[in-house]
Amino acid sequence: MKQTIKILASILFALLAYAYLNFFTSIVFPWQKTEAIKTTLNWGGLSELPKEAENISVEKSGSMFTRTFTIEFKADQTAIENWILNSKRLKDNKPKVKGVNKTYEIYPGENESLGGKVNVEKGKVTIRMSWS
């Protein structure tokens, strides 16, 4: 009987740890990365990331009822400009400019998402899109 309780407690602990890591932390597991990028680009009406994109990082935040994805990547200026021109929600969007920083606001987003922002600064792009 004690052995059964220990096994059930271990299983419960593992399930709770998985749920916590999956829903309440900013960790994006390797098997989730591609889908997170695809979803973020979809919500923003954005083109696929440039082939030249480097140092791609993906973070998530929110809960079971909300989700925000943040993607960062670096690329040369030409690749970023082509990416902007190929993105339906950026190509005709006038950015807010502060020095070398350009911020494109996308509200509302695609597919019933809340939307978000795309920030471009010296070869670094940060995309932040949300859904609720």
Image (cartoon, rainbow, N blue to C red):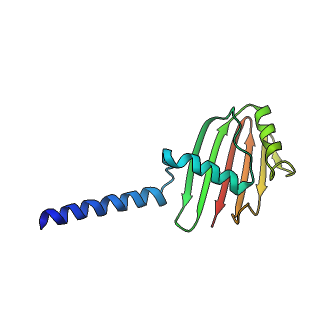
Q: Is residue 17 left or right of residue 73?
A: left
Q: In what quadrant of the picture does the C terminus appear?
A: bottom right
The image position of residue 125, as x and y in percent, is 70, 42
Which residue corresponds to the image point at 73% horizontal and 35% vertical from the top-left?
123
Q: Residue 39: which quarter of the image?
A: bottom right
Q: Is residue 48 left or right of residue 102?
A: left
Q: Residue 126: which quarter of the image?
A: top right
Which residue corresponds to the image point at 62% horizontal and 50% vertical from the top-left?
70
Q: Is residue 16 left or right of residue 55?
A: left
Considering only vertical position in the picture, is 13 above or below 81?
below
The image position of residue 58, as x and y in percent, is 58, 46
Considering only vertical position in the picture, is 59 above or below 76?
below
Q: Residue 73: which quarter of the image?
A: top right
Which residue is farthest left?
Answer: 1
Considering only vertical position in the picture, is 27 above or below 9?
above
The image position of residue 24, as x and y in percent, is 48, 60
Q: Is residue 36 left or right of residue 97?
A: left
Which residue corresponds to the image point at 48% horizontal and 60% vertical from the top-left?
23
Viewer can see residue 24:
no
The image position of residue 116, as x and y in percent, is 71, 57
Considering only vertical position in the picture, is 100 above or below 14?
above
